[in-house]
Amino acid sequence: MTLAFCAAMVASLFLSGCATLNKNECQTVDWEQLGLQNGQNGEPQSYIAEHQKACSQYKLPVDTAKWDAGWQKGIRNYCTPANGLAAGQKGRTDASMCPADQMQQFSYYAQIGGRVHSAQSAVDSARYELDQISNDIKVEKDRDRRNDLWRRRDDARMRMQDAQDALYVAQRQADEAYADLMRKGPPRQ
């Protein structure tokens, strides 16, 4: 194989891996259904540009009006308080894509969920640090260095406990918020 052919194959694989749609999908997609799915997944309205970029490679049009009609329906399904809580727990706290009448509640619950995500990240980080220090202690031969590592391990254990306490509090707040949402029932649209 020639170098040019290999480079073309790599470029082709790279481009196809980044595209939101392939040629067949650009030709056959139900744009309204795709917009609905994108909205329900919390993609911003600007996400249509990704589809335009993908389909422009094949010189195929994107039905932005149909996509937008679907997206408008889908984003309303995404921007519920319960979904804000779930999205926040995954680290997605941005509510800017939500319609104005849903943005405040989605954001409120996303922030509650976001505290769980942040606290879990702190626990994970503390656990990693503690594991690293414990591994270092196992292999360290120098007595002074081992003593220093033991002190660092004690400090790391305290940080781990603090992080676990914060996670417990954040999770309780999220559980209370979820229970409150369940008592209220689904929002009226």
Image: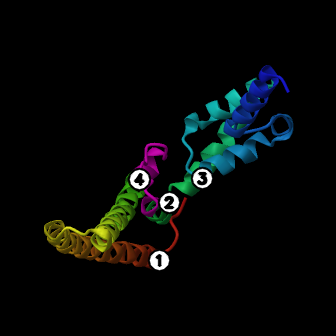
Name the front one of labels 2 and 3: 3
CA–CA distance in space, label 3 to label 4: 13 Å
Report which residue position mark 1 lands on.
Answer: 182
CA–CA distance in space, label 2 to label 3: 12 Å
Kindly identify the residue that appears in the image at 57 percent across and 38 percent down.
Answer: 45
**Quadrant of the image containing the C terminus:** bottom right
Kindly identify the residue that appears in the image at 61 percent across and 53 percent down.
Answer: 40
Q: Amino acid at mark 3?
A: Asn
Question: Does residue 132 appear in the picture of this structure?
Answer: yes
Q: Amino acid at mark 4?
A: Thr
CA–CA distance in space, label 4 to label 2: 13 Å
Task: Give the image quarter of residue 123.
Answer: bottom left
* Residue 188 pos. (x, y %): 53, 63
Q: Residues within 10 Å of mark 1 (few under 14, many from 20)?
A: few
**Tag on residue 93?**
4
* Residue 184 pos. (x, y %): 44, 74
Q: Is residue 92 left or right of residue 170?
A: right
Kindly identify the residue that appears in the image at 17 percent across and 65 percent down.
Answer: 145
For label 1, the SS is helix
Q: Nearer the viewer, residue 178 or 7?
A: 7
For label 2, the SS is loop
Report which residue position mark 3 lands on.
Answer: 41
Q: Nearer the viewer, residue 186 or 158?
A: 158
CA–CA distance in space, label 1 to label 4: 21 Å
Question: Does residue 62 appear in the picture of this structure?
Answer: no
Report which residue position mark 2 lands on.
Answer: 80
**Tag on residue 118?**
none
Name the front one of labels 1 and 3: 3
Q: Residues within 10 Å of mark 4 (few under 14, many from 20)?
A: many
**Quadrant of the image containing the N terminus:** top right
The span picked out in magenta is 87-103
